Image: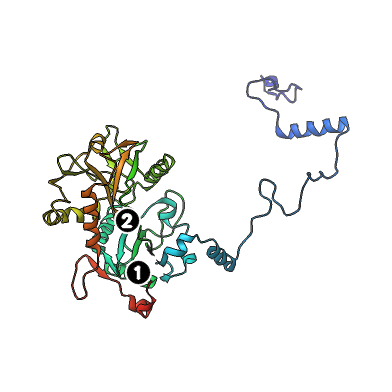
Amino acid sequence: MEAASTSCRCQGNFPASNIGRPGWRIPRARVLRLRSQALVEVGKFNLEPVPFPKGFRPGVVPGSRTKPTPLLDADVMVQRLRSSMHDYGRQNFGAFYSSFMGGIVTDPALMTVPVDDQFVCKGYGVSETVILRDGHLYMLEEHMARLTSACAQIGLSLPFSAVAIKRIILDTAAASGKLNGQLRFWITPGRGGFSPVELGGSEPALYVICLGDTYEIDRTEAWDAILAEQPVQATTVSSVLGNQRLLATVGQVEARARDAHVAIFTDTEGFVQHCAGYTVCILTQQDTLVYPPSDYAAPSVTLARMLEMIPEERARSPDDVIVSNVQQRKLHISEVLAAKECFLVCTTFTIVPVCSVNGEPIADRKTGLTTLALHYMLDNDMLAPPLGVYSPRHLQVPYGYMTGMRSQLV
């Protein structure tokens, strides 16, 4: 027993080799030693420096680039922001407010949002748009109500009170010096990390930009639509404006590739969901105005105002507005193709006629009289009231405070 307890090393017996066993690999150090020995044996071991490759230039990063990436200082960065600004921005970016900067700028090159803002890197935030017409903001109260409701729904705090936010929006419009255009504004959680588990940490942010673009289109030229390839999935944030923006944008890219103007989303049974942020409406052969439920998109402020005005407009122009009644219900795409008229409703373009879906014509492919009448009804409603007349839907922009003189308006 004592002899058996003696180590195998003292007896000269070594453990069996692992060579050949499944999963066995030569140790890395041994591999390097064997390679060095092999090079020495064949006389190829060379301590001379490796020659430079053909075309090598010091300071140039190998690969497809031909020069190193420059490191910019602040002055060069601002200069390049100005030189790279596109023509649309130069012509239409009137003024921009950032709560991080604590003020307004009118230089388009300085209208930037931090890259770590949670709306930029995660899409966490809420956006709204209001019309600027004749120096007045149209239905700002209604859009603010939708904004605050959406923020509460997704657990987002306002950076300021609603009254303070409205004042900032008005001052941004005034600083632009523009009488007509649009105001777009965003509430975000502010700056923070990039990982999915980081939700900011700084103060909530507000951004406001005043655009001089009035988005005028020729409504006698109706739009062609396509059916998007995949439906929108209903979520708990479906009623938040912009919640389906990525999918809607992908649909727009698809529409552009197929020489169409817009993509309509339908469910698996063919019922209309929404149209890239627009509400799809039809006028049936029985003169019924039908639009789908807002289960997949935010409720439209412009649509609500249009429906409110229809009874009075129908009484005033019965030959143009021939709407007998209004229904909000499930709308099948076959009803769209069989409709007397079809149009889209949104804040940006108010009302846009649609003449076809996937190449199939709607009626005679022409803009309907009711579609045009409803557009002009809304367009007239946007006009500023006469001096001294109060309108709950129009809020006057305080140009004098920000510009100093009315002659500076453009």
The residue wearing badge 2 is: 348
* Total marks in image: 2
Given this view, does label 2 or label 1 mark the residue nearer the observer? 2
Q: Which quarter of the figure has residue 227?
A: top left
Mark number for residue 291?
none
- Percent across and percent down for residue 74 are 57, 67
Element under disc 2: loop
Q: Is residue 64 left or right of residue 214?
A: right
Q: Does residue 111 sit above or below 245 in this rendering?
A: below
Q: Which quarter of the figure has residue 253?
A: top left
- Percent across and percent down for residue 363 are 25, 39
The residue wearing badge 1 is: 173
Res 112 seen here: no
Image point (62%, 60%), residue name: 71
Identify which amino acid the numbered label 1 is placed on. Answer: Ala
Q: Quadrant of the C terminus?
A: bottom left
Q: Residue furthest left?
A: 315
Element under disc 1: helix
- Percent across and percent down for residue 18 are 68, 22
Q: Residue furthest bottom?
A: 404
Image point (14%, 55%), residue name: 317
Q: Residues within 10 Å of mark 1 (few under 14, many from 20)?
A: many
Identify which amino acid the numbered label 2 is placed on. Answer: Thr
Q: Is residue 21 left or right of residue 124?
A: right
Q: Is residue 319 left or right of residue 247?
A: left
Q: Quadrant of the N terminus?
A: top right
- Between marks 2 and 1, how big is the CA–CA gap? 17 Å
Q: Does residue 343 sit above or below 102 in this rendering?
A: above
Image point (88%, 33%), residue name: 43
Q: Is residue 404 left or right of residue 345?
A: right
- Percent across and percent down for residue 277 are 32, 48
Res 285 seen here: yes
